[in-house]
Image (tube, rainbow, N blue to C red):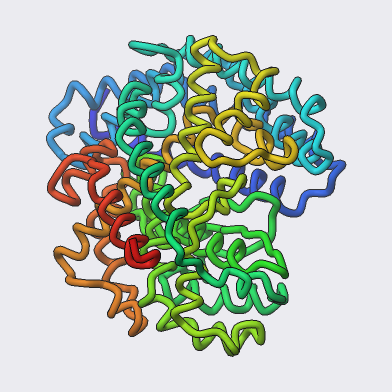
Amino acid sequence: MDPKHAYQELVRRGQEIAYLHALGALAGWDQRTYIPRRGHPHRAKALAALTGVLHRKVTDPEFGRLLAAVEDSGLVEDPDVRANVTRWRRDYDRATRVPERLAVELAEAASAGESAWAEKRDRNDWEGFLPFLKRVIELRRAYAEAVGYEEEPYDALLEDYEPGLTAREVERLFAELKPQALDLLARIQASPERPPVEILHRTYPRAAQEAFVLEVLPELGYDLTAGRLDPTLHPFAIRIHPGDVRITTRYFEDFFNPAFFGSVHEAGHAMYEQGLPEEHWGTPLGESVSLGIHESQSRMWENLVGRSRGFWRRFFPRAQARFEALRDVGLEDFVFAVNEVRPSPIRIEADEVTYNLHVLLRFELELALFRGELAPEDLPQAWNERMRAYLGLEPKDPAEGVMQDVHWSGGSFGYFPTYTLGNVYAAQLFAAAERELGPLEERFAEGAFAPLLDWLRAHVHRHGRRYLPAELIERATGEPPTARYLGEYLEAKFGALYRL
């Protein structure tokens, strides 16, 4: 087989698969936004059918033969070819270990689980949701056994979201972060300083919130000609194509934070997807490398940028023009309020200091489930015990506790640790950007967000999956991933706010 033609055929097949994934993404976006209630059962079967088609395509023996023809040729001396073939080989080998029946069952169970979660969570019905969750867990265990692992089943799940990461490495990371977070939280709670958070709970009309968000996001770099903003129960970003990357948010007219900061967070995800090289669409070089890197982009824009004083020097006058509720509020009070540190039972509303404790709780429960140390039936009790231990809180019901996130309903076990990795990566990348560009807050105050976005485009986005996540961070920052920069950032920021 001619290697050049073999590679061209791999690219063609990759693009065909990418277009089918795009249709699946569009169907998934609709399922989580505007689908009629009675449309869910049919959509679950439609997505399962598409999964079957995709699984047959990605496990086609001919794909393996094409890969072998290129791997055994001089074409791999080209770095682009070598990177694509290396990632394709990894994906192909994992996919071919999963029987088509299992892949289809997982897709159908995930779709049914997400639909059940949306319904049962609204009714606070844990017992009604439990059978769907147990089915998903059963299938994810089977998946882990099928793809294989070196140490434990959870490693196989992590590999889908953060290639190269193991459970033991995540445990070591949390062993470093947990005492720091608990110590900083205790000192903040002992401080007499308290932000005037009541200003965030005045009346913020939904239409004004949406208009303000749509005014701010393009200035940050989110291209609305290649995206859109819609309401949903659980915010998300989804790429259909680099020219169609959609985000969602949820509005509360008595609370400013969720819609605004949730939108900036999702726009961070979307700007990463919009920044991937479109000329590599359909190949690994046109795809995001991991969820940890993805989360670094969203958390950076939400927190290191969006909650900074420089950012609000730029946008607070406009917020005052939009919202009557802010017209008697000073800039410093507002900045302190949006950076309040206060334990909350809800992860997506958690502050920067307590956020990683929310992730730790979920990681420990997932690990216990897949190590056989915890039964699904016992999740609510285990959840509440850790919530009391880490945050001093007791969820009032399952909807506020164990059922608050959509992830488990769709089988996304191994996903949660990437949120904390995102925080770690974000602080390290931001520090590296400032070493090269100089202090960024003054630029934010002037409305100059492009220097940071351009730096991220050059050091993160344009590489696609060329490097593993840890390799990408080391190339971008000059050192392997480390939690040091996150600790320094949190200590400096909240030490100043709370006068520690």
Picture coordinates of residue 410, whole percent (x, y): 63, 32
Q: Is residue 471 rendered to the left or right of residue 168? A: left
Q: Where does the C terminus fall, quadrant-wise?
A: bottom left
Picture coordinates of residue 325, whole percent (x, y): 65, 82
Q: Is residue 113 visible?
A: yes
Q: Is residue 101 visible?
A: no
Q: Closest to the observer: 23 or 16?
A: 23
Q: Closest to the observer: 230 or 46?
A: 230
Picture coordinates of residue 121, whole percent (x, y): 76, 39
Residue at image point 58% right, 78% down: 212
Q: Closest to the observer: 185 or 67?
A: 185
Residue at image point 49% right, 54% down: 351
Seen in the picture, residue 403 relative to 91 is either above or below; the reply is below
Q: Where does the N terminus fall, quadrant-wise?
A: top left
Q: Closest to the observer: 131 or 455?
A: 131
Residue at image point 17% right, 32% down: 76
Picture coordinates of residue 16, whole percent (x, y): 49, 39
Seen in the picture, residue 227 relative to 196 is either above or below; the reply is above
Q: Quadrant of residue 129?
A: top right
Residue at image point 18% right, 43% down: 474
Q: Quadrant of residue 253?
A: bottom right
Q: Is residue 260 rendered to the left or right of residue 150? A: right
